C-alpha cells in the first residue's frame, strides 16, 4: 500500500502521455480513481512495480524512501518506482467460453524504456494470470501508439477486437 500514491502519479503520467494518441481520459482529474484502482490491485495481488535508481528526481513516481518494496526486500532511498503493471481476471456480465485475464495498465518511465523493464512486468502479469487459470489475456492500446503496438506484437499479442468512434457533431462528415 506504500506504493499506491506513486503508482497513481505514474498512472497520471501514462494517461497524460496517451493524450497524443487520442485518448479521452483526463489525466490529473482521474488521479483519485487511479489511486483507488491501485489500492484495489494491491489487495487482489494485481499490481507489480519495478524499481530502479531514481535518475530524474522531477519525474512522477518518486518514492518516500521507505525501506521495503512490498515484498520484504530492502531498497535504498534512491530506488524509485520506474514502472508498473496492473492486471486481473476479467469478470463481466456475460459468460465467455474462455477465462480471460486483462492487463489494465503497463507503464515504464521513459528513461527505463527499451531495457526490458516492460517485458519483465508483462511476463510477471502473464505468469500471475496463468497461475489464476486464465486461458487468454487481453489488453488495450491506443490505435495510433505504434511503439506500444510493436511492443505487444513482439510479445505475441494479436488484434482481437477493434473499437471505432466518430464525433457526433462538428466534423462535417454527418450525412442523412
Image: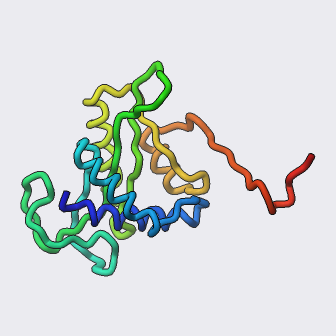
The image quadrant that residue 8 belongs to is: bottom left
Res. 34 image quadrant = bottom left
Q: Position of residue 45 (x, y in %)?
A: 23, 43
Figure check: 159 above or below 20: above
Q: Evaluate whether residue 116 shows in this view.
A: no
Residue at left 41%, top 30%?
Answer: 100
Count of labels shown? 0
Residue 174 at x, y percent in the picture: 86, 52
Q: Is residue 5 above or below residue 78?
A: above
Reply above or below: 113 against 86: below
Which residue occupies the foreground of this view, 102 or 75? 102
Identity of the residue drawn at 28% across and 65% down: 5
Residue at image location 46% in from the left, 46% down from the top? 152
Question: In which quadrant of the rendered image does the N terminus lie?
Answer: bottom left
Query: Seen from this angle, which residue lies furthest top?
Result: 97
Q: Is residue 125 left or right of residue 165?
A: left
Name, please, the residue furthest toward the right. Answer: 176
Can residue 87 be seen here? The reply is yes
Task: Determine whether 70 is above or below 63 in the image.
Answer: above
- State the scheme by which the image is colored: rainbow
Q: Is residue 43 left or right of residue 71?
A: right
Find residue 19 and report its horizontal and vertical position in percent. 56, 65
Q: Position of residue 136 (x, y in %)?
A: 42, 29
Residue at screen point 33% across, 55% down: 36
Amino acid at each position: 500500500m506504500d506504493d499506491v500514491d506513486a503508482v497513481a502519479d505514474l498512472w497520471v503520467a501514462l494517461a497524460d502521455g496517451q493524450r497524443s494518441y487520442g485518448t479521452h481520459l483526463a489525466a490529473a482529474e482521474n488521479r483519485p480513481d487511479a489511486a483507488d484502482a491501485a489500492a484495489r490491485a494491491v489487495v487482489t495481488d494485481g499490481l507489480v512495480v519495478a524499481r530502479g535508481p531514481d535518475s530524474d528526481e522531477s519525474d512522477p513516481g518518486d518514492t518516500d524512501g521507505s525501506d521495503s518494496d512490498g515484498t520484504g526486500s530492502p531498497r535504498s532511498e534512491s530506488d524509485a518506482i520506474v514502472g508498473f503493471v496492473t492486471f486481473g481476471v476479467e469478470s463481466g456480465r456475460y459468460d465467455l467460453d474462455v477465462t480471460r485475464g486483462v492487463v489494465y495498465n503497463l507503464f515504464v518511465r521513459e528513461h527505463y524504456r527499451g531495457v526490458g523493464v516492460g517485458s519483465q512486468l508483462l511476463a510477471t502479469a502473464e505468469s500471475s494470470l496463468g497461475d489464476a487459470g486464465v486461458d487468454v489475456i487481453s489488453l488495450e492500446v491506443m490505435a495510433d501508439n505504434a511503439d506500444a503496438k510493436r511492443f505487444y506484437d513482439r510479445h505475441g499479442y494479436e488484434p482481437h477486437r477493434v473499437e471505432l468512434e466518430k464525433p457526433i457533431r462538428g466534423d462535417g462528415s454527418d450525412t442523412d
